[in-house]
Amino acid sequence: MDDRENSLQTARRIVSQRLESLQRAGVEQIGRAAFVPLPVAESMVGTAHPTTAVAEADALAGHTTLTPALSQGEREYMPPPLPESLTSTSTMPRSPARPVAPASDLPLSLTQPYPKGLANSVAGRQQLLDDMNTEVRGCTLCKELACTRTQTVFGVGHAKPRVVFFGEAPGADEDRQGEPFVGRAGQLLTKIIEACGWARSDVYIMNVLKCRPPDNRNPLPNETDNCRQYFVRQFEILRPEYIVCVGTIPAQALLETDVSVGKLRGKFHRYRDSTVLVTYHPSYLLRNPSAKKYVWDDMQMLLKEMGLPVPGK
Ligand code: URA
């Protein structure tokens, strides 16, 4: 069987498993998503209000199709227990007709389950992350970045997270401090995380590149290729239920696409056993504050999907 046929077969299997699991959950019909625009979190936007959210919601509702998503029961690993702060007692119903990316013959690299058998305890995973961090510190695959960086910036947060925030590359502040998202954009990302009811330590935060590109230029394709092995392995250790790609670079690198963030957001995608949400990068929001309402729409969609309450609602 060739690769294409193989991946078609995998996609068919996943779709049919997904349909069966929806059926088991009592879903009899897959309809168009009924999107109700919700107000934007004050902490994110001050007094701004989502005046165009209705049009946005209508546009999104038109994209409702089944994605080749795996449900919890189909996963080949035990889903990690939730950190206290991410555990909800809410009985908020999930919308079975959520907007999702169109099912297509996805590359195998996006549909392969995470490997079984890696450490599952927080301490065990942290050890694996620490060992990998040591390896990354010595990386010289990108000659320019290895010469210009102050230090590598690996990732930070809970080793057994429900959600991973996935960014582009360290900037000057991150390069200095050795931690992702600590500069101005990072402070806005922290606000977004907190608006969801979490602390930075509840989630995991990491980037595509582990080194700062000089003058904050975009990562070059070969730099993303060199770092791919690291973020792939990080996700295999973390095995998050959800990945939030902030910006074009992480979204396109993870989903192996050249589709824009504007088109990728507003629906869920799949990366192995993780459900992926794409939204705008906080740096973009610093330049275009009016886009904050879209990010808050995206985060509310995520919270609903996770079965968690929207703070302040
Ligand atoms: N932008 C990113 O994408 N990552 C960081 O760590 C900081 C800014």
Image (cartoon, grey):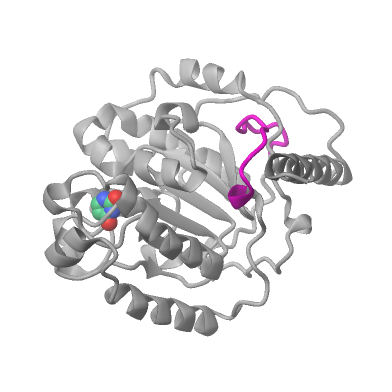
Q: Return the x and y of residue 112 as percentages of the image width and height.
A: 66, 55
Which residue is rendered at x = 81% and y = 45% of the image?
Answer: 13
Q: Main secondary structure of the magenta part?
A: loop
144 vs 29, left or right, is left
Visible residue check, residue 254: yes
Residue ID at (79%, 39%): 12
The image shows residue 228 at horizontal and vertical percentages of: 42, 57
Does 103 lie within the magenta span? yes
Q: Residue at x 30, y 62 (%)?
A: 210
Residue 200 is covered by the magenta coloring = no
* Residue 162 or residue 16, whichever sits in front: 16
Q: Quadrant of residue 162?
A: bottom right
Q: Can residue 299 be seen here?
A: no
Image height check: is 238 above or below 250? below
Q: Closest to the observer: 24 or 225?
A: 225
Residue at screen point 42% across, 65% down: 230
Classify residue 211 by image quadrant: bottom left
Q: Residue 199 occupies which quadrant of the picture?
A: bottom left
Instruction: Return the x and y of residue 243 as percentages of the image width and height.
Output: 50, 52
Image coordinates of residue 305 in percent, x first then y, are: 61, 44
Q: Nearer the viewer, residue 302 or 226?
A: 226
Outermost residue toward the front? 2
Start-end of magenta stretch:
95-110
- So how many labels did they put on this image? 0
The image shows residue 220, relative to residue 137, as above or below, that is: above
